[in-house]
């Protein structure tokens, strides 16, 4: 039997819960979980913000643990080693996206905590290709947030070729945003941070921002038409037309923050300057491995606060209220 914490109703507290572990497939690994980060997607799921939750719901998809058992097709020397699992715990392996190495776009992707119990638990089963070895340089508590937050904000910089001489803006400095600042800085861009939280302004500079601003529209006027790339990690709605006005001609806004509210954009905000809006979903296994190597090499890490799993509701409340600096991580 597996044990952990589940929400039983939308917006409810997480309560102790137990269930039968999923059977270990030929290519699966079974992790003894040591750590699990709390992503705002866990809050969206608990609250049924996206209208897709079913209960009891065991959240958690920034999972780190030690491999306890492996299926017959998995290298048995992985037993006893550390591994991390993010939002995705499996894919079909045969569709066009999987064959291209973009497994994160697989239509038959398996999500770690949607339709199956996630990482607020003692154990987790994942496909071997989605349970990533953790570089020795990264301790388990700091590794956990890299598997969702880290992957999600690293991938757009690679896909969109961000580099030196580009002006980049990061919107929202939560779990994703504070890592995005560090990745943008590591790619050599000039980085601006946008936040609603005054106390984050100084810290943003420590994470690599050259300037930190609020969304005050007056303050933004001198910056109009100047950004090559904006990344929104905000979990709520924003004044999108004003934000698009910050983009230089042919500039791009990439949205990873998943506000439940539909985005409202005036056609002329895109037509003028031929600006682009796109989304981005987590990262592929090869992008995740690359991101882990970059973090190991450069010292990029999430800033975390740890709590024992038994204090899961306090940790969730810190994320929900915006008090977390910058990622809550549960420890078994
Ligand atoms: P988080 O730690 O709660 O951070 C979100 C940040 O958004 C907050 O810290 C705050 O930043 C800002 N914010 C919140 N409400 C706001 C409002 N009303 N107006 C302006 N800014 C506001 O959340 P997270 O874990 O980083 O996740 C962020 C979003 O990304 C969530 O929607 C999550 O579901 C989504 N997500 C998407 C993917 C993907 O693959 N696309 C993966 C993971 C997460 P400031 O204090 O700096 O203003
Ligand atoms: Zn997540
Ligand atoms: Zn596939």
Image: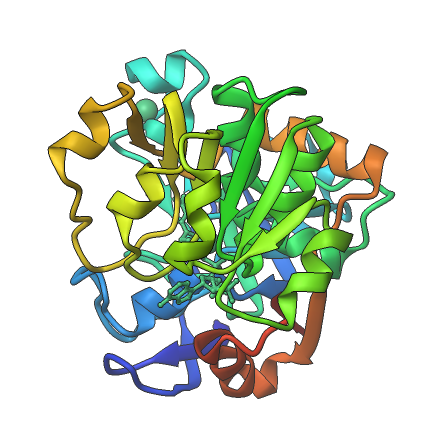
Residue 59 in view (yes/no):
yes
Of 99 and 170, the residue lying toward us: 170
235 left or right, relative to 9? right
Residue 94 in view (yes/no):
no
Q: Residue at x 38, y 70 (%)?
A: 43
Q: Residue at x 77, y 54 (%)?
A: 206
Q: Residue at x 41, y 82 (%)?
A: 17
Q: Is residue 212 above or below residue 13?
A: above
The C terminus lies in which quarter of the figure? bottom right
Q: Is residue 169 above or below residue 129?
A: below
109 left or right, relative to 167? left
Q: Could you say where residue 300 lies in the image, as x and y percent from the top left? A: 76, 44
268 left or right, relative to 249? left
Q: Residue at x 59, y 86 (%)?
A: 310
Of 290 and 324, the residue lying toward us: 324
Of 278 and 102, the residue lying toward us: 278
Q: Could you say where residue 158 lies in the image, as x and y percent from the top left? A: 55, 22
Please name the colour scheme applied to the rendered image. rainbow
Q: Could you say where residue 107 lies in the image, as x and y percent from the top left? A: 25, 30
Q: Could you say which quadrant of the image residue 278 lies in?
A: top left
Q: Could you say where residue 302 lies in the image, as x and y percent from the top left? A: 70, 55
Q: Quadrant of ligand 1?
A: bottom left
Q: How many numbered discs, if any?
A: 0
Of 293 and 271, the residue lying toward us: 271
């Amino acid at each position: 039997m597996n044990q952990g914490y589940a929400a039983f109703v939308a917006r409810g507290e997480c309560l102790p819960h137990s269930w039968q572990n999923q059977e270990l497939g030929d290519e699966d690994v079974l992790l003894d979980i040591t750590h699990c980060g709390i992503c705002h997607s866990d809050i969206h799921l608990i609250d049924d913000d996206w209208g897709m939750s079913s209960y009891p719901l065991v959240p958690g998809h920034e999972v780190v643990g030690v491999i306890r058992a492996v299926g017959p097709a998995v290298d048995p020397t992985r037993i006893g080693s550390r591994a991390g699992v993010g939002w995705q715990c499996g894919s079909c392996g045969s569709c066009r996206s999987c064959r291209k190495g973009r497994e994160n776009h697989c239509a038959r992707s398996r999500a770690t905590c949607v339709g199956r119990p996630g990482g607020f638990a003692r154990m987790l089963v994942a496909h071997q290709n989605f349970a990533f070895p953790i570089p020795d340089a990264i301790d388990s508590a700091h590794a956990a947030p890299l598997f969702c937050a880290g992957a999600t904000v690293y991938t757009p910089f690679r896909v969109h070729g961000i580099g030196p001489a580009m002006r980049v803006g990061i919107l929202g400095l939560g779990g994703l945003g504070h890592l995005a600042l560090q990745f943008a800085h590591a790619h050599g861009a000039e980085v601006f941070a946008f936040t609603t939280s005054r106390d984050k302004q100084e810290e943003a500079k420590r994470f690599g921002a050259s300037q930190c601003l609020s969304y005050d529209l007056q303050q933004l006027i001198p910056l109009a038409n100047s950004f090559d790339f904006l990344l929104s990690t905000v979990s709520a709605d924003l004044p999108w037309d004003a934000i698009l006005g910050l983009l230089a001609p042919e500039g791009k806004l990439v949205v990873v923050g998943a506000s439940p509210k539909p985005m409202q954009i005036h056609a002329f905000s895109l037509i003028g300057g031929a600006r682009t809006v796109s989304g981005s979903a987590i990262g592929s296994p090869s992008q995740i491995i690359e991101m882990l190597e970059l973090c190991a090499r450069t010292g990029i890490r999430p800033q975390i606060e740890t709590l024992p799993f038994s204090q899961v509701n306090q940790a969730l409340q810190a994320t929900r209220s915006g008090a977390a600096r910058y990622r809550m991580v549960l420890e078994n």
